Image (spheres, helix red, strand yellow):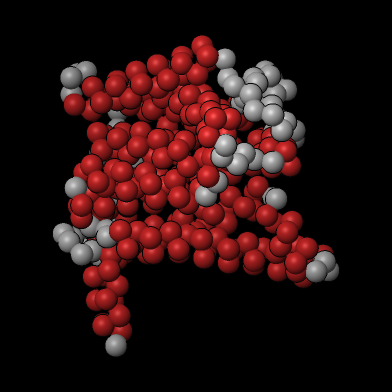
Amino acid sequence: MARAHETAYSDAMLLGPRGAVSLLGALGLLFVVVAVAMGALSLSAGLQALLSGVPFGAALDATWVEPVVLQLSLLTGLLVATGVGTAGAWGKELTYREALDITPVPRALIFFAIMGGLALQFPLRELVNLIVDVGGAAAMSVEQQMMLQRAVRIDSVSDALLVPLTIVAAPAIGEELLFRGLMLPGLSRRYGDRAGLVLSAALFAVIHGAPALIAMVFIAGLVLGYVRQRTDSILPCVAMHGAFNAVPVLLPVSVVRIEGFNTVGEDVYHLPLTLALGGAVVAAASVMAIARLSSGDGD
């Protein structure tokens, strides 16, 4: 019976060459992410309720607005899903490092990945502003905007450690392992490179949930996926993703006020055109440099 279950799981994950991942299998992995993250949040709330004596419901509500607990719970879900998916796709044929392409790359690639990630934040943030303003998509409430500002603000020594870990590093590592390390190459083996790129970016967008963010995250997923395909490593993707996440931490409103980027309010504001376009140009140039270096033309 155990062998039958193992075979059925492997077939659901593969449906093609060894290392391939089907769309159904990828959707199943997203379910694993959500289920494990919810379980971790519930466990955290249960411990808090037990230790502090507050009702479980109140403790659970508190965990939803605590960025450290939220991000670490999500990271747990991402890592579990990556482990399960990699085992299903490859079995014992490859180590996790080999299966997920955690391979060293030249420092120049990491440099351009960081530059591209920093720059990409601005045009994609302006895209969200346009979707909310013109398309009528639901924006974050003022309370959600304030919660996000609190999450990226560094006011203490502990914040200086926790914010980079939970806001910058944890999502970049966990999401890149699953979406660009496992899903992108797995879906590409099953459906082809272009379809794999689009499908992995779409799944990446779906798990972020908020309608106003879907287009932004989808485009980011395409860029990250393209970098992964050109470099054959997820390390530049982790660097680019981490740099993208770091921008709100590096540029809080207390450092520089940028309308449409780090301000809070019910009205929709837009970034300065020079910042949005300049960011797009730098991001595009960085990705082109990565492609050129990866092809060997830059040697």
Residue 193 screen position, x and y as percent: 21, 44
Residue 26 screen position, x and y as percent: 35, 59
Residue 186 screen position, x and y as percent: 26, 53
Find the residue positioned furthest to the bottom.
1
Position of residue 202 in the picture relative to residue 160 (left or right): left
Residue 56 screen position, x and y as percent: 75, 69
Residue 238 appears in view: no
Quarter location, residue 83: bottom left
User: Which residue is rendered at x = 46% and y = 14% of the image?
Assistant: 278
**Number of numbered discs visible in the structure rendering:** 0
Residue 189 appears in view: yes
Vertical placement of 211 versus 134: above or below?
Answer: below
Quadrant housing the C terminus: top left
Find the residue positioned furthest to the left.
17
User: Which residue is rendered at x = 45% and y = 26% of the image?
Assistant: 120
Quarter location, residue 6: bottom left
